[in-house]
Amino acid sequence: MTQCDLDRAVARVTGEDLSTIAGMGFVPLTSVPYETERSPLTVDWDELDAQRTGYFPKRRARRFVTA
């Protein structure tokens, strides 16, 4: 089954436009998982947090003056 055949079959069953289905990225099922570097299935939250801390400069602690 080609990609075009798969898109047509899904569009026929769901009633959606072929262009809508083609943009959703349906792929045939395989025995080996299909992954691309552009869309990883996991997120390394520690790495993401480390990247985000560079976006905001560290603030100095506020001092409260007491009278």
Image (spheres, rainbow, N blue to C red):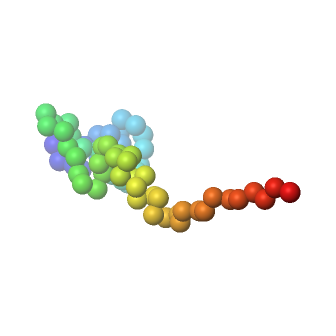
Number of labels in the image equals: 0
Q: Which residue is outermost to the left? A: 31
Instruction: Give whichever of 3, 46 is nearer the camera.
Output: 46
Q: Residue at x 36, y 35 (%)?
A: 13
Q: Which residue is outermost to the front? A: 67
Q: Residue at x 75, y 57 (%)?
A: 64
Q: Where's residue 54, x and y in %?
A: 45, 63
Q: Is residue 8 visible?
A: no
Q: Is residue 12 above or below residue 22?
A: above
Q: Quadrant of residue 37?
A: bottom left
Instruction: Give whichever of 57, 2 is nearer the camera.
Output: 57
Q: Quadrant of residue 50?
A: bottom left
Q: Quadrant of the C terminus?
A: bottom right
Q: Is residue 56 left or right of residue 2?
A: right
Q: Where's residue 29, x and y in %?
A: 20, 36
Q: Is residue 2 above or below residue 60?
A: above
Q: Is residue 35 left or right of residue 46?
A: left
Q: Is residue 56 above or below residue 9?
A: below
Q: Where's residue 45, x and y in %?
A: 39, 46
Q: Quadrant of the N terminus?
A: top left
Instruction: Give whichever of 49, 60 is nearer the camera.
Output: 60
Q: Residue at x 14, y 37 (%)?
A: 32
Q: Where's residue 47, x and y in %?
A: 35, 52
Q: Is residue 40 visible?
A: yes
